[in-house]
Structure formats: C-alpha cells, structure tokens
Amino acid sequence: MKVKYLGNKNSTKVLEYSPNLLDSVKRSQINTMSYYGIDYWNVYEFSFLNAENKPNLETIEIKISVDSNFTVESKSLKIYLASFYKRKFKDSINAYTIIERDLSKLTNSKVKVKRKIKYDSPPKSIKLNGLLKTIKKNTVMKFEGFRSICPVTSQPDWANIYIHSSSDSIDSIKIIKLLKSFREKGDFHEACIDSIFLTLRDQFKIRDLTVCGRFLRRGGIDINPIRSSNKKIIFKNFRDFNQ
C-alpha cells in the first residue's frame, strides 16, 4: 500500500488547506454487511480562527461507519486538519461542515463531525489479563496492553480491548492467546479489530458479540474501532485514562 505521508520524514510542514491532502485506505473487509461498526476518531488538536481573528483550539469527534468503502489514513488527516489553523470561520459549525464534506467524499460514506466537550466514563469491566477462568455472558471484559505493529512504519501501537457477549460464556485463556498473537503483527487499528471480531465470531462461535479497541493517541489523534453483531452498539465513545 502506498500512502502520501505515513513513514515520510519530510512531510511535517503545514500546508495550505486542500482536500487533496487527505489519503484514503481501503477497508480490509469487503463483506462488511455481515456485521455493524463505527470508527470513532478523537482529534485533540484542531485549531482555526474565529470571526474576531482569534485562535480556537477544540477537541472534535469524527465518526466513520464500517460500511464505508474507504477510511482515512491518520497522518494525512493530521496534516489536513493542521491546515485549518489560519482559516477564519464565523463559527465552528462551518469548519465541521467542510471536514464532513471532504471526509464523506474520501470514504464514500456519510461522515459525522462534532465538537467534544467531555467523554463518558469507561464501562464497568473485569480485567482479562491473567484471568484463568470462563467468563459468564453479559460481562464486559477489558484486556490492557494490547500491542500491534503499524504495517508502514513498523512502530508499535497500543490499546485497551473491550469484549462483550450477551449470548455466550467465553474462555479467557483462548481470548488472551488470540489478543497476544497481534504483538508482532502489522496491521492498522481497524483491521486488528475486524480480525479479532471475526475470529471470535466465526472460530470461537460467539454469537452476540461486540469488540471495541481504545487505541492510544498518536500525533494528537486516537482511533477507536467498534465491531458488533448488533445494529445497536452498546459502547459509546468513552475515553480511557491512558488515552
């Protein structure tokens, strides 16, 4: 896969605004209609000039559906959003409208953007690490210290993984082994969660299933994919302490 900026050490200069700064990444799963999902992108460093020519610094949430044909490459999104810093807007809604338009065109889907004032608390969960027993259904499990490798830069990515099933009990030993198998594996955040969800559903035969990855931020952005067998997804865009 060829991308414009990721892994390019000469791509740190802030450029003039253009939707062409954005780089798309094709979804790893073609048959996404077999499950539901959302990717929550939290951007902590979005700045622009207000009507009085004064800088605003905001945190924004970008919501991309899993059924989009493409997603956005993270470093290109950072460079694209950084280009807004000297653009003047009457209010932030006008800036969000432009971002929604550009990302919707890039991903071939309806992207939603809004300002984030506060985050929900993480759901109550049991810590999966080191747990040696079968976990009953309707229990939220949390695995801390999930590690995967960026397929372009070979740098590690870290996350907390949340898993829930309302239909089946789950063997903690097997799940821990699955999650640890990603520690030397190169894949993007979304593809990792796709793979975990599909393995648990198809090989472990877990029917009613939701998997949520809360990845630690890089470059002022964290990416949080959720995959579920239910259209109504139980996890919100909460925030873990170490994000």
Image: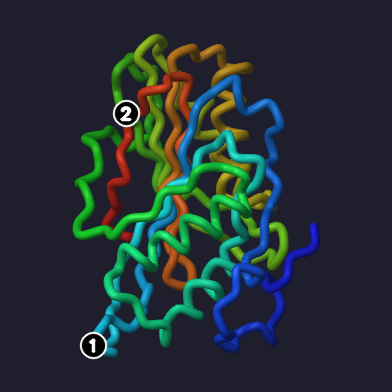
Point out residue 225 in the picture as x, y percentages from the top left corner.
48, 43
At horizontal 29% and vertical 52% (from top left) the residue drawn is: 239
Which of the numbered marks, if any, corresponds to residue 223?
Answer: none
Q: Quadrant of the N terminus?
A: bottom right
- Of the 4 image quadrants, the one containing the C terminus is bottom left
Mark 2 is surrounded, within 10 Å at the Cα level, by few (under 14), some (14 to 19) or many (20 or more) other residues, namely: few
Among the two numbered marks 2 and 1 on one chain, the one whose residue lies closer to the N terminus: 1
What's the amino acid at mark 2? Ile
Could you say which is closer to the camera, residue 67 or residue 138? Answer: 67
User: Quick check: 85 left or right of 21?
Assistant: left
Where is residue 31? Give x, y as percent.
Answer: 68, 26
Between 3 and 124, which is closer to the camera in this rendering? Answer: 3
Left or right of residue 2, residue 136 in this image? left
Residue 129 in view here: no
**Residue 201 lies in quadrant:** top right
* Residue 26 seen in the current view: yes
Q: Residue at x 55, y 50 (%)?
A: 104
Question: Amino acid under label 1?
Answer: Glu
Q: Judging from the image, what secondary structure is the residue with disc 2 in?
A: loop
**Callout 2–callout 1 Cβ contact below 8 Å:** no
Callout 1: helix, strand or loop?
loop
Residue 3 located left or right of residue 135: right
- Position above or below: 185 against 85: above
Q: Position of residue 105 (x, y in %)?
A: 60, 52
Q: How many marks?
A: 2
Would you call the spot at circle 1 few (<14 residues within 10 Å), some (14-19), or many (20 or more)? Answer: few
Foreground mark, 2 or 1? 1
Name the residue at 54% across, 23% down: 35
Quarter of the view holding residue 123: top left
Read off the residue under disc 1: 52
Which residue is at 55% across, 39% downward? Answer: 193
| Residue annotated with mark 2 | 234
